[in-house]
Image: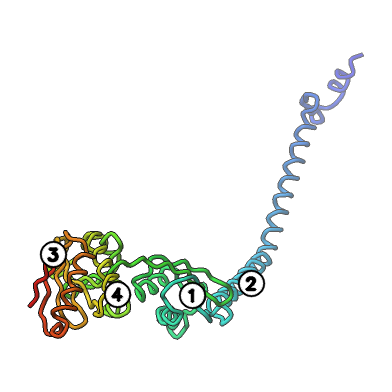
């Protein structure tokens, strides 16, 4: 007997209901889907509640760390730049040179005494090597190179190299140092005329020269040095300076300490001309020498004086 027919035929029309056919597993899948969605929503809701609750705590921690960092950086900066621990106490000159320790202290003093808004800049980290080097070079034009070494916490050492000066060159109001090639190596001061134990060459043409220019020829420098040596060894008078009528011409003049001018030719040996002058001086002009204006030795074998 077909049971479905019995139920359908035996039940009243109001009690009948149609039960739709379902595919196997369909209801289970919908239920499972709803369950997963519910769990995701719960987790998402839980995360939001956690982040919002912990935000004030995170801000507080970040603020505390920032404040601590500012304090550390500020303390370190003060310790490095403004405390007396790194204040320069000594400047030291090392090596063989003519510059003195007193000159170094005098040259660097303006930098060590500087202040900004009352804050001293005399600090191992604030002093510039470039500024220190320039100060030393300005104080002593002979200085060609400066190497600075910092000895912490408070000493700065200077290793100084000086130029080899062959002569002091004077042209009008300009005073410079020359190297052995006759080139201008640096500016000089009036004090150099008294301090430097090198020939002083006066350019009578009064022309301006710049660093690197060839002021005169090496032969003029060599000849001046020969005359200086011969006078020191054989004659009683001292050379005050040399004069060049032309910077690269064939003659050189000696001005003695008594103001007498001696005219020499670069075309003749220096020793020969000095020998002639020595003979004339001892035999003829010794008594009247200081009243003479000049002695001309440019003609081979002769001396003319007035």
Front: mark 1 or 4: 4
Front: mark 1 or 3: 3
Tag 4 residue:
232
Front: mark 3 or 2: 3
Q: Which mark is residue 48?
A: none
Q: Residues within 10 Å of mark 3 (few under 14, many from 20)?
A: few
Tag 1 residue:
93
Tag 2 residue:
68
Q: How many marks?
A: 4
Q: Nearer the viewer, residue 116 or 212?
A: 212
Tag 3 residue:
301
Distance Cα–Cα, label 3 vs label 2: 93 Å
Report if residue 115 is visible in the image: no
Residue 218 location (% of width, % of height): 25, 59
Distance Cα–Cα, label 4 vs label 3: 22 Å
Q: Quadrant of residue 134?
A: bottom left
Looking at the image, the residue that sits furthest to the right is 1
Secondary structure at numbered mark 1:
strand
Residue drawn at (67%, 67%) of the image: 61
Whether the residues at callouts 3 and 2 have beta carbons within 8 Å, the answer is no
């Amino acid at each position: 007997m077909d049971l479905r027919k019995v139920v359908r035929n035996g039940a009243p029309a109001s009690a009948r209901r149609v039960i739709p056919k379902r595919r196997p597993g369909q209801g289970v899948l919908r239920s499972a889907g709803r369950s997963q969605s519910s769990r995701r929503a719960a987790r998402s809701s839980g995360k939001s509640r956690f982040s919002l609750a912990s935000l004030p705590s995170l801000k507080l921690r970040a603020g505390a760390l920032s404040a601590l960092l500012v304090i550390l950086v500020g303390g370190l900066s003060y310790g490095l730049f403004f405390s007396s621990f790194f204040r320069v106490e000594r400047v030291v000159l090392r090596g063989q040179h003519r510059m003195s320790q007193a000159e170094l202290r005098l040259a660097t003093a303006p930098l060590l005494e500087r202040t900004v808004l009352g804050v001293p800049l005399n600090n191992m980290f604030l002093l510039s090597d470039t500024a220190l080097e320039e100060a030393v070079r300005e104080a002593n034009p002979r200085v060609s190179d400066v190497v600075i070494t910092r000895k912490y916490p408070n000493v700065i050492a200077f290793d100084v190299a000086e130029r080899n000066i062959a002569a002091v060159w004077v042209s009008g109001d300009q005073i410079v140092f020359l190297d052995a090639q006759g080139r201008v190596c640096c500016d000089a001061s009036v004090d150099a005329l008294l301090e430097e134990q090198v020939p002083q060459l006066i350019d009578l043409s009064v022309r301006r020269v710049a660093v690197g220019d060839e002021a005169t020829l090496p032969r003029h420098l060599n000849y001046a040095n020969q005359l200086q040596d011969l006078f020191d060894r054989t004659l009683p008078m001292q050379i005050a300076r040399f004069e060049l009528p032309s910077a690269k011409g064939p003659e050189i003049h000696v001005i003695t300490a008594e103001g007498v001018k001696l005219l020499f030719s670069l075309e003749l040996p220096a020793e020969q001309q000095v020998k002639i002058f020595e003979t004339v001086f001892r035999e003829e002009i010794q008594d009247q020498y200081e009243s003479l204006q000049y002695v001309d030795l440019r003609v081979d074998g002769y001396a003319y004086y007035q």
